[in-house]
Image: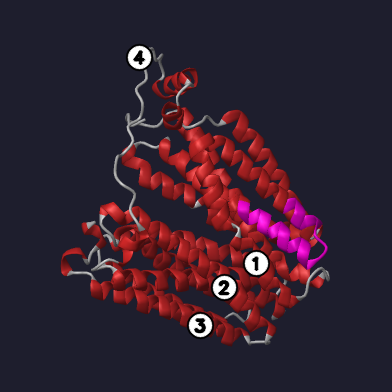
Amino acid sequence: MNQPGLRQVQYLVFCFSFLVAVADGFDQTIVSIVGPVIVKSGVIGLNDLGFVFFAGLIGYVPGSFLLGAAADRWGRRPLIVIALFILAVGSAGTALSRSLGELFIARFVTSLGIGGAAPCLIALAAEYSPRRLRTFIVALMWAGIPFGGILSGLTASIWLARLGWEAMFGIAAACTVLLAVIVQLVVPESPEFLVVKGGREDAVRNILERLGGGTCDEPLAPVPTPLEAPSSPKELFAAGFVRGTTALWIAMFAGFMQLIMISQYTPILLQIAGMRADDSGKVFTLFYVGSIVGTALAGPAIARVDGCKATAGWLVAAGAATAFFGGFASTVDRALVGITLVGLLQGLGLGALIAISASLYPAHIRSTGFGWAVGVSRLGGAAAPLLAAQLVSRHTTQVAFYMVVASIALLAALAVWFISAERSPRDASLSSR
């Protein structure tokens, strides 16, 4: 696996892992674009959109926990296939929904599939990656989710007005089923998983031969398992980490809360203001383009500066750009320029925040710290549509809505600044970690 160069089977795994992430991102975001159209169709009221978005987020955590754990027992590939079929069922159910209750259930099922696919595809990609490229490849796979968001915006801008909102979810369901079938037929299981589980030597040899380009006749040795005792979440609040953990959790909660409020409610607010649905889809697409570019720049950037202070600055700039966007986006052209800037700064700030959450703790509790920080961010994402729905239901102006979102970004920046204040000069730079 660690030999120079990549083999065809590795490219195959990475390609389909990326496509699974794209499917996740497409179905996650298409509902934000077509939400106002669903309201206009009379299926739900405007005030109900927050509950629909909430349902599309709360299933992520149990889906990730249950299917991710099952992948360690039964394999990465079968659980990816199961997660994709769950996602397809949720998408088809969304297309067929004719009431708030039906939409709530369909979006919850969808989020179960999304949450389950993510850890499985990341595990499979990581286990096929050379050690020297693992971080880069895993990050590239994860970029498939915002890429799916871009694809959803482009699809809606072309086909929404012609085919209707039901067709958007029907297309997503059909493509997801097709992808699940191809993954089952074409993508190999993780050789590391097969060796650990035992009893599948022929399958392991076949994969190793495809990786090495020859035959494999040597006996297979089991993959060693680390013997470290599992760390406890209590250690995150041990001496020296109390303020850092608290500040990190506030930053993650607020950072991802304002991200979801922007990504899910910008198309709605722009359409309420009179913008056509296909034009709001273009705005939505450019937000994700900016976000992908910002996230890609965040890693190299924080290696050269004080990571926490830079991240706080980027989040402040993101908040200012968001507030400016609320009063600036009066035309399609202005909205396109403004949302691209917001997405770029959001990508820089939140991409760097993810890096901080993975580097704040020493090695023996780093995975626990990162896992809990991401979990808290999902709670912020789940709370976002509830707050946004309240603001919209009170007929809050577009300017006021984005001022609220900007203030949440400033809260995240302040929390990151407290992290910076706690870290010693020795480890103030992320590059030292």
Where residue 323 is drawn, which disc sits there?
3
Residue behind mark 2: 384
Gap in angstroms between the C-alphas marked 2 and 4: 55 Å
Of the image marks 3 and 4, the number of the one nearer the N terminus: 4
Q: Does the rendering let one see residue 122?
A: yes
Gap in angstroms between the C-alphas marked 2 and 1: 9 Å
Mark 1: amino acid: Phe
Of the image marks 1 and 4, the number of the one nearer the N terminus: 1
SS state under label 2: helix
Q: Is residue 216 left or right of residue 141?
A: left
Q: Nearer the viewer, mark 3 or mark 1?
A: 1
Q: Residue 342: percent from the left, percent from the top? A: 49, 72
Of the image marks 2 and 1, the number of the one nearer the N terminus: 1
Examine the image and state in which quarter residue 223 appears.
top left
Residue behind mark 1: 53
Mark 4: amino acid: Glu
Instruction: Provide the residue span drawn in magenta.
Output: 91-112
Residue behind mark 4: 218
Q: Please name the residue shown 77% across and 65% down the image.
A: 101
Gap in angstroms between the C-alphas marked 3 and 1: 23 Å
Gap in angstroms between the C-alphas marked 1 and 4: 53 Å
SS state under label 3: helix
Examine the image and state in which quarter residue 360 appears.
bottom left
The residue most toward the left is 426
For the residue pair 203 and 32, the one nearer the viewer reads as 203
**Quarter in which the N terminus is drawn:** top left
Mark 2: amino acid: Ala
